[in-house]
Amino acid sequence: MNSSQERRYRSTGRGGTKRQEILAAATERFGRDGYEHTKWADIAHDVGVGPTALYHYFESKQHCLYEIMDEAIEDFRSSFVAITTKERDPARALAAVMADSFDLSEQEVHRNRVLVAEQGRLSHPSTAPPEEEARLAARARTRDLEFAWASFLSTAMRAGAIAESDPRLLTRAVLGLYNSIWHWYRPNGIVALTRVGEDFTGLALAMVGVPPEALQPQRAAA
Amino acid sequence: MNSSQERRYRSTGRGGTKRQEILAAATERFGRDGYEHTKWADIAHDVGVGPTALYHYFESKQHCLYEIMDEAIEDFRSSFVAITTKERDPARALAAVMADSFDLSEQEVHRNRVLVAEQGRLSHPSTAPPEEEARLAARARTRDLEFAWASFLSTAMRAGAIAESDPRLLTRAVLGLYNSIWHWYRPNGIVALTRVGEDFTGLALAMVGVPPEALQPQRAAA
């Protein structure tokens, strides 16, 4: 099972627990209709429970949102670490990370849309302890993801595989470029995801300064 | 007066009308504290009027937000057109547009923060006519800005000045990269705006495929 399949399994809630079903239903509603325009009661209806039953799993709609964001960021982080640990060539590792980032189910596209549309909420403290705990966890996870990227880019720069620049700003540029897609991309819209993936992968590699010849197939030693 | 100074003049409300003072106060509050966390009454207090007096100028807080966004997008569009009309060399025009985009007052940084944090609201119709009119105006303005960029990039591709790709996707990539900055950049934070501007200008030009030698000073003909 590749990392994308694992993510899909987890996020569609086929793991079987009611909590995962709620997360999956909320992700779809938030991603399609927007967080503000989704009622807690609609999510309850989607999973076949009464609205009060939801409070057995989540403190609030906001708590549920933070859990979705935290899981999304953790999936990005763990995939990034797995790919860059396995592929030691920095240029090929980058290309593999980009390819993986566009290998998405519709549910994962919704989740990306939620992540970028609501990221601003992570800056505002909550008064309810479970919400605040989930918010801080998602923020810490974001820092972990950024740190993993910056460390990788810094190593790649020292190896001469990519152009020299500030690794932390380059991290923000790469993640910012990728995240920007989910502000306008919609599943089943006019532009196919594979087209977007091809174009943005090429643009990201050019921005990072991977020479195109670095990705040519290596010839076997004679 | 350059385009940045004109923008500053307009957006700080030194033009003198109460409406412009309200827009300036709202921009600062929304940019610093967030739109949701700003009370209409706080803005009234900032400009020295009672809360009900605000309704003489705006239908609602949301109406005021849409007007701020519309003005910001129009300023980006008119600056882009002015610069690309004056500088006929595509690579130099791009560099000049990027330089102008980082020549910002603190008020303009707040405005950019508002624009990117609240852009998702432009997708949701309003029931109040003045709000809906302002929302549709801001959306149309966004399309005009994207069209101006895509036309420019398409011409630059045909002239061989930048790498070939889909001009509409490249437009979204460039604007997405620039917009992403305002999700994390804060005035007077640890990273100086000039540093961010230098790094992101270099990254954007590399992404678009401007060869570095295209920006070297031209030698005078002997």
Image (cartoon, coloured by chain):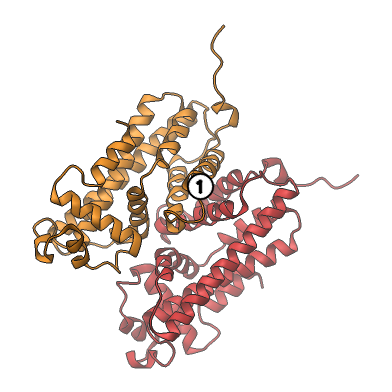
Chain colours: A red, B orange
Q: Is residue B126 visible from the viewing direction of this image? A: no
Give neighbour class at mark 1: few <14, some 14-19, many 20+ (Cα, 10 Å).
some
Q: Amino acid at mark 1?
A: Val
Which secondary structure lies at badge 1? helix
- Occupied quadrant, residue B99: top left
- Occupied quadrant, residue A149: bottom right
Look at the picture and state if A59 lies above or below A152.
below
Q: Residue sitting at 45 percent across and 38 percent down?
A: B98
Residue under numbered circle 1: B196
B203 or A21, nearer to the observer: B203
Q: Position of residue B209 (x, y in %)?
A: 55, 36
Q: Residue sitting at 14 percent across and 63 percent down?
A: B128
A174 or B193, nearer to the observer: B193
The C terminus of chain B - image quarter: top right
Report whether A37 appears left or right of B221: left
Q: Residue sitting at 43 percent across and 56 percent down?
A: B186
The chain identifier of the residue carrying mark 1 reads: B
- Occupied quadrant, residue A160: top right
Look at the picture and state if B4 lies above or below A190.
above
The N terminus of chain B - image quarter: top left
Q: Position of residue A100 (x, y in %)?
A: 61, 61
Q: Position of residue B66 (x, y in %)?
A: 24, 55
Report whether B73 appears left or right of B197: left
B104 or B156, nearer to the observer: B104
